[in-house]
Every structure is written in structure tokens, then in C-alpha cells.
Amino acid sequence: MDNDHQNDTGFDANNTVKALIAMETTPSYMEDTYNTISSIVSWIIVVNGTLGLIGNILTVVVYTKLGFSETIHMSYVALAISDFFCLLTLLYVRFCFTAEIKSIFLRYRMLLDETLFANFTGAWPNHGFTRTTALLTAWISLERCLCVLFPTRVKLMITPRVTKIVLTVIFTIGCCPVALAFIGIKTEMDFDPETNYTTLILRYSHGNQDLNPANRIAFVLYGALYPIASWLIVVVCAFFLITALKRSARWRSINTRSHIGKSTGSCAEKESRKIPSREARVTRTVVVIACAFIFFSLPISATVVIAFVYRDFSVKGYLHYPLLISVTFSFLFGGLNSSINIVVYTLTGSKFRSTLIELFKRNHS
């Protein structure tokens, strides 16, 4: 294949395979380290992804049974759907680098560049759903902040209709820009008469150095705007919610102690119940989801910052194997973020936990 199409990759782990790099520029131990880490992480992704798919399906089923009288349930279901497709596309990308995909093409005497094939058919859709998950997490965090700030008016502000509109908009702006990345893609079939094999080539028609405006919009949205905006919103909201929970717990403790010893002790009990325990549980659930998102997004955030500062931390740079390792862990952490929520719901939500247990009991009976 020519050098032109080898430059046409996106901005994920699949864009940085060692076949695209001049191997003599880096020490061999870096390659060995990457290969070892990659093989281990790949299997973790497969196991976690499979369990995560099941977990997100169960999340949708349980919240559907609980009903959508609470708008937060709609948001949880939307998040589970987005997480499901995050994991599905991630597993597909992993499948693109297995011997099975090669054998399928070899049956038709075809060869392909697994990197480009995985990038265009799996990695870009994965970007779309990953950013949608980030935006949904930001919305859930913001919604809970509004509930804390305006407890008496939030039901009028965030109605089921408003929630449906917001979730639809998030999925639209999160997933639809993926189509922009496919504008200008060129498909070529390169037949080699000596081997009687045809090579399938997918690439941008002008190469990465001359992307069309639509491609650039997709790169900016998924590479900068969406991750930065969602991360900032989640961080600010998580800080606010944690502060609110601490203030509430401190107020309840002080208020209760001030009434200890009084014969009418019911006054303290009534005051302490002014903060509904159910609302506190929901807030804690959102805080855990937000903190998990912040933690699991750190690898990709650090990768983007380092790549921006150091030129050698790139596909063609001296530190391309450290980049590969960093992006590999970014994919792993992204998969963990998309599969952990059912654990959070089970531990923090009594209704979710009881409904989930009842669901399993019914299936076993």
C-alpha cells in the first residue's frame, strides 16, 4: 500500500499500530512492553465488555419496570443505552484485530488494513457513543444540581417532556457528527495478479494533511469540544453536590444533637426528616457516577494534554509506543466507565436492588 493512505487514521488506539511507524527510531523494549500490555488489556476489555453489555440491558429492564414518573430514570436508561453501544463498538474494534476477521476476508481472497478498517467502521462510531455518554453524564449531574438548588420548582422546570427533548438532543448532537467523519472517504480495491489477492483500502481522499471542513468539524467536536465541556460540567456539578451532601449531613447532625435530652424528641426527628432520604440517595448515586466518569476519563484527558504539549508523543514521534500504551488504557478505562453503573445503582438504590433481585428470582422460578 502507498504511504498516502497509511496516514489516514483518526485519533484513537487503532490509528497507532506499529505497522505505520518507522520501527528503527524506537527501542525494541518499548514495542515489547506495548505488546504485552495490549494483549492483557484486550482480554480484560472482552470480559468487561461482555459483562457490561449484560449489565446495561438489565439496567434498562429494571428502570422500565420501576417506571418513568421520576425523570432521572429516563436519564439513567438513556445512559445505559449509550453505554451499551460504547461497549458494543469497542468489542467490535477489538474483533477487527483478531484472526477471525482475517479469515473471513481471505475466503474471498481479500486483504485489508485492519487498522483503517477498524477505525472507520468501529472506532468512529465508538467516539460518537463515548462522547454521548459524557454529555449524558453531564446532563444527569446538572439535573441533580438543579434539584438541590430549586427543590420546590424543579418539577416544573424538568418535566418528562423536557427530559425527553434534552435526551433526544444529546443523542443527536453526540452521534450524528460521526457522519461528518465519513465524508470524503475513498474506497479502493488493489488487485495483485502475482498473489491473486485484492487489498481493500479505506482512506480519506486527500490524506490527514488536507481534511475537508466536515472532517475537521468531527475532529474538533469529538477531540476537544465535547470531552472538555462535559468534563468541566461534571467536575463542577460533582463538587457542588459533594459540598451539598456534606452541608446537609452536618446540619442534620447539629440539629439532632441540639435536641437530645428533650422529652419531646419528636421535634428533632421532624426537622431531620426535612431532607428526604430518597433525594439524598439519588444525589449520592449521581455523585458516584460523576466521580467514576472523572476518574475513568483521566487517561484520555492526560493523553490529549501530553500529545498537545510534546510533539514526540504522537503517531510519528519517538514516544509513539508510550502513546499506544496510554491510549490502550484509555480504551480500557472507557469500557469500565460504561459497565460500572449497574453496580452503582445496585449499591445505592434500594428500589433498583429489590427489583433486580426480584427479576432474577422470577427467572429462576
Image (tube, rainbow, N blue to C red):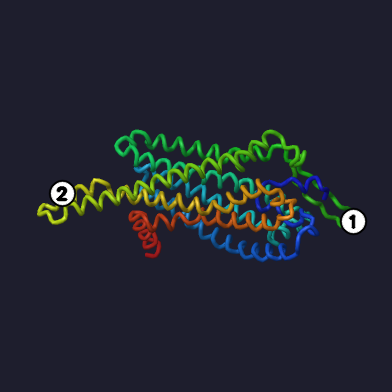
Q: Is residue 300 above or below residue 211?
A: below
Outermost residue, left side: 263
Mark closer to the chain start, 1 or 2: 1
Which residue is rendered at x = 30% and y = 49% of the image? Answer: 278
Q: CA distance from mark 1 to mark 2?
A: 91 Å
Outermost residue, right side: 194
**Left or right: 277 with respect to 194?**
left
Q: Could you tell me residue 105's position as x and y percent?
A: 74, 56
Q: Are marks 1 and 2 in contact (CB under 8 Å)?
A: no
Quadrant holding the C terminus: bottom left
Q: Could you tell me residue 28's position as x and y percent?
A: 75, 64
Which residue is rendered at x = 58% and y = 60% of the image? Answer: 45
**Left or right: 166 with respect to 172?**
left
**Amino acid type of disc 2?**
Cys
Residue nearest the viewer, comparing 344 with 196: 344
Which residue is rendered at x = 83% and y = 55% of the image? Answer: 197
For residue 194, the mark is 1
Q: Is residue 65 above or below residue 182?
A: below
Q: Which residue is mark 2?
A: 267
Q: Could you tell me residue 17's position as x and y percent?
A: 72, 55
What secondary structure is found at the residue carrying circle 2? helix
Q: Could you tell me residue 277's position as x and y percent?
A: 29, 50
Q: Nearer the viewer, mark 1 or mark 2?
A: 2
What secondary structure is found at the residue carrying circle 1? loop
Q: Residues within 10 Å of mark 1 (few under 14, many from 20)?
A: few
**Amino acid type of disc 1?**
Glu
